[in-house]
């Protein structure tokens, strides 16, 4: 995982917050000082003015919308400049700049926070794949990696993490990470059981794809969870990700005998990660199903096409259903929408609310970073999901984590759709 990935996540979180309240949600990460850094007051009056200047200049110069999402930048400055000048500590300055930028779908990260992310973003944790629920009040465990400390401790799909190290306010996925050999205390609620505390010793979690394939019935329908699609390290390459997925599909003969495979259910629920690795891997994955352009990126500088990456083998005759939920990340939702728009897949799940934007980060004079949306996704039919919305073909309203894999209602609906002859094929 790299800092740029986290910056994009921050921008998306604050953009979602702006759409609901005049200020950001209480659980927005980095909004509140959590005490893990000593408070400092190094930013003087001039430095605070420079920070505001640089932040708003980046927005003015780079923002995808020349109207800045309907926000008047002069009014925005006038609203926040006195508040930024009045606070005592630097972390309060950055929290207010973050709040200011959230109105235009942007974000800021101080040098100290960047350093903390770099230190904490190594793959040392407990081995769970989680999503935030209830406006960030709870972390839901989507999957537990085989052989991980979490599996040894008895954590399972569907468990909710209520608190990390007994801090009950807004548990955040990064809070679970930390140096190998250190302990983390998780307050966990399993379905139908009382809350319990679990102490787990962190260890190095190898960043590998670890895709999962299951044969769903006797009619050639296969379930695929692509696994971890983003990150860094010698084991993490786009070609390596695709090879791992291909090897998993080979276990059920998908490429050796594609005619025997009636349908493929691809599970992108809870999929996160917005880095270049995930971007390339998803384009390569799309190459098994479609040729040519997937979508366009449109900005003030023009329009550019984003194509699939051609693959030597294809799954043209295989019906495709993609599962999504409210926690499906930007890139994966775009991938699903692109295949839906081209008539190559049907979507099962919850309506997905994401920014549908690409972000650019700029480092400032004091080594902090400003993140600004500089382009927007446009599907090939000319529609922009940010404006028109993205709705599954079959909408689900239950929480899939409350069910076993075999009883998953999303999967049952996908099977029903695939059994309708010709669904999602060219």
Image: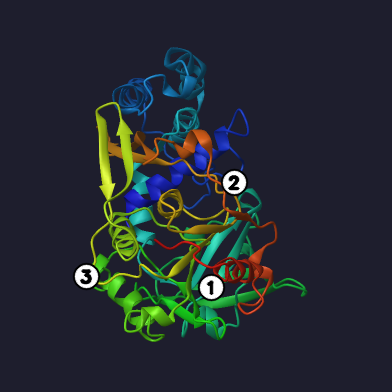
| Nearest to N terminus: mark 1 or mark 2 | 2
Q: Kindly tell me whether residue 109 is visible in this rendering.
A: no
Where does the image place residue 47, in percent across and percent down from the top left?
33, 25
Q: Quadrant of the C terminus?
A: bottom left
Task: Give the residue at mark 1.
Answer: 143
Q: Quadrant of the N terminus?
A: bottom left
Asked if disc 2 and disc 3 are in contact, CB closer than 8 Å, the reply is: no
Where does the image place residue 204, in percent across and percent down from the top left?
37, 76
144 lies above or below 15: below
Q: Kindly tell me whether residue 10 is visible in this rendering.
A: yes
| Nearest to N terminus: mark 2 or mark 3 | 2
Task: Give the residue at mark 2.
Answer: 27
Q: Residue at x 48, y 53 (%)?
A: 36
In this view, the mark in front (1 or 2): 1
Horizontally, residue 346 falls left or right of residue 155, namely left
Please identify the quarter of the rendering in which residue 2 is found.
Answer: bottom left
Asked if disc 1 and disc 3 are in contact, CB closer than 8 Å, the reply is: no
| Nearest to N terminus: mark 1 or mark 3 | 1
Q: Residue at x 35, y 65 (%)?
A: 122
Task: Give the residue at mark 3.
Answer: 312
Where does the image place residue 369, in percent across and percent down from the top left?
32, 38
Q: CA distance from mark 1 to mark 2?
A: 23 Å
Are there few (<14), some (14-19), or many (20+) residues within 10 Å of tag 1? many
52 lies above or below 319: above
């Amino acid at each position: 995982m790299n800092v740029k990935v986290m910056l994009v996540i921050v921008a998306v979180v604050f953009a979602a917050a702006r759409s609901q309240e005049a200020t950001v949600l209480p659980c927005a990460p980095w909004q509140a000082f959590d005490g893990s850094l000593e408070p400092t007051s190094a930013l003087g009056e001039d430095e605070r003015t420079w920070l505001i200047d640089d932040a708003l200049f980046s927005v003015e110069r780079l923002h995808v919308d020349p109207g800045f999402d309907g926000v008047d930048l002069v009014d925005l400055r006038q609203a926040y400049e006195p508040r930024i000048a009045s606070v005592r500590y630097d972390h309060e300055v950055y929290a207010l700049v973050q709040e200011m930028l959230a109105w235009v779908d942007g974000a800021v990260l101080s040098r100290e926070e960047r350093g903390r992310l770099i230190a904490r973003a190594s793959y040392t944790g407990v081995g769970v794949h989680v999503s935030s629920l209830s406006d960030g009040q709870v972390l839901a465990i989507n999957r537990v990696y085989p052989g991980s400390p979490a599996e040894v401790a008895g954590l399972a799909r569907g468990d909710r993490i209520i608190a990390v190290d007994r801090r009950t306010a807004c548990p955040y996925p990064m809070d679970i990470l930390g140096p190998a050999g250190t302990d983390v205390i998780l307050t966990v609620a399993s379905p139908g059981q009382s809350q319990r505390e679990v102490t787990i010793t962190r260890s190095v979690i190898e960043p590998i794809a670890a895709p999962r394939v299951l044969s769903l019935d006797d009619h050639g329908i296969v379930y695929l969870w692509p696994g971890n699609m983003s990150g860094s390290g010698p084991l993490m390459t786009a070609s390596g990700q695709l090879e791992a997925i291909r090897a998993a599909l080979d276990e059920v003969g998908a490429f050796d005998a594609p005619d025997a495979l009636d349908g493929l259910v691809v599970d992108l629920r809870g999929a996160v990660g917005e880095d270049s690795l995930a971007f390339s891997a998803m384009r390569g994955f799309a190459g098994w199903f479609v040729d040519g352009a997937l979508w366009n990126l449109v900005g003030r500088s023009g329009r550019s096409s984003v194509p699939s990456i051609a693959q030597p083998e294809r799954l043209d005759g295989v019906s495709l259903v993609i599962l999504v939920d409210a926690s499906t990340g930007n890139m994966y939702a775009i991938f699903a929408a692109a295949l839906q728009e081209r008539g190559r897949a049907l979507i099962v799940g919850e309506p997905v609310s994401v920014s549908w934007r690409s972000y650019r980060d700029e480092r400032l004079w004091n080594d902090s970073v400003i993140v600004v949306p500089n382009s927007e996704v446009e599907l090939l039919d000319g529609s922009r999901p940010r404006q028109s919305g993205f709705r599954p073909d079959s909408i689900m309203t239950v929480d899939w984590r409350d069910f076993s894999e075999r009883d998953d209602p999303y999967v049952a609906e996908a099977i029903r759709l695939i059994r309708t002859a010709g669904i999602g094929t060219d």
